[in-house]
């Protein structure tokens, strides 16, 4: 099968048929110490980047800021599903009805309930 460069970056718990997944395999082979990755999506003028096995703190927020780590809510679903309680755009907290969200680095689409979507537009 020919491919155009799509690579699944799921953790080992997402493998339904025992397939060897990229990130866990790289860690098992000793190519990376940590089974994680990070990415920065930039504008057309700047180059986007992916870092496998870690993250570059200079690419995310302020140099002295701390990360907030989130657990995958239901790994058995094979989705990057996280618990969700609130959302802010700038200083405005949005009124949401969501309790979980799916994170997907393979798309730039964002789907919201209508009420939340129109709050973002306003």
Image (cartoon, rainbow, N blue to C red):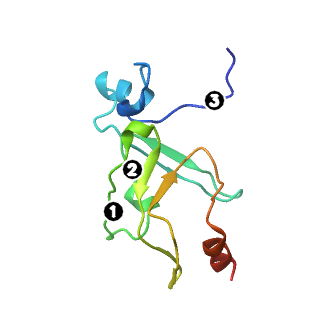
Q: In which quarter of the image is residue 26?
A: top left
* Residue in the image at 63% along x and 59% along y: 111
Dot 1, crowdedness within 10 Å: few (<14), some or many (≥20)?
A: few
Q: Could you classify mark 3 by the number of other residues whose Cα lies within 10 Å: few (under 14), some (14-19), or many (20 or more)?
A: few
Residue lying farthest to the front in this orientation? 97
Q: What element carries label 1?
A: loop
The circle drawn on residue 85 is: none
Name the residue carrying label 1: 67
Measuring from the top left, give residue 28's x and y in whole percent: 29, 24
The foreground one among 50 and 78 is 78
Q: In this view, does 104 lie to the left or right of 53?
A: right
Is residue 112 shown above or below 35?
below
Q: Which image quarter: residue 7?
A: top right
For the residue labelled by badge 2, is the local secondary structure a helix, a strand or a loop?
loop
Q: Which residue is rendered at x = 49% and y = 65% of the image?
A: 98
Vertical placement of residue 15 versus 97, above or below: above
- CA gap, disc 3 and disc 1: 29 Å
Residue 29 drawn at (x, y percent): 31, 21
In the image, taking residue 45 as reference, residue 64 lies left or right, namely left
Q: Where is residue 30 in the image (x, y as percent from the top left)?
A: 29, 25
Residue lying at 66% horizontally and 55% vertically, measured from the top left: 109
SS label for mark 3: loop
The tag on residue 55 is: 2
The foreground one among 39 and 102 is 102
Q: Where on the picture, by quarter, is residue 120?
A: bottom right
């Amino acid at each position: 099968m020919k491919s155009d460069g799509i690579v699944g970056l799921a953790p080992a718990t997402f493998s339904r048929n025992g397939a060897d997944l990229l990130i866990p395999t790289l860690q098992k082979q000793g190519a990376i110490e940590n089974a994680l990755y990070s990415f920065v999506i930039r504008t057309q003028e700047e180059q986007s980047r992916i870092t496998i096995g870690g993250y570059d703190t200079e690419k995310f927020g302020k140099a002295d800021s701390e990360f907030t780590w989130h657990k995958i809510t239901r790994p058995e679903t094979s989705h990057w599903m996280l618990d969700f309680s609130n959302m802010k755009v700038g200083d405005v907290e949005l009124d949401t009805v969501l309790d979980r969200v799916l994170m997907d680095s393979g798309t730039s689409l964002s789907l919201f309930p209508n009420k939340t979507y129109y709050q973002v537009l306003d």
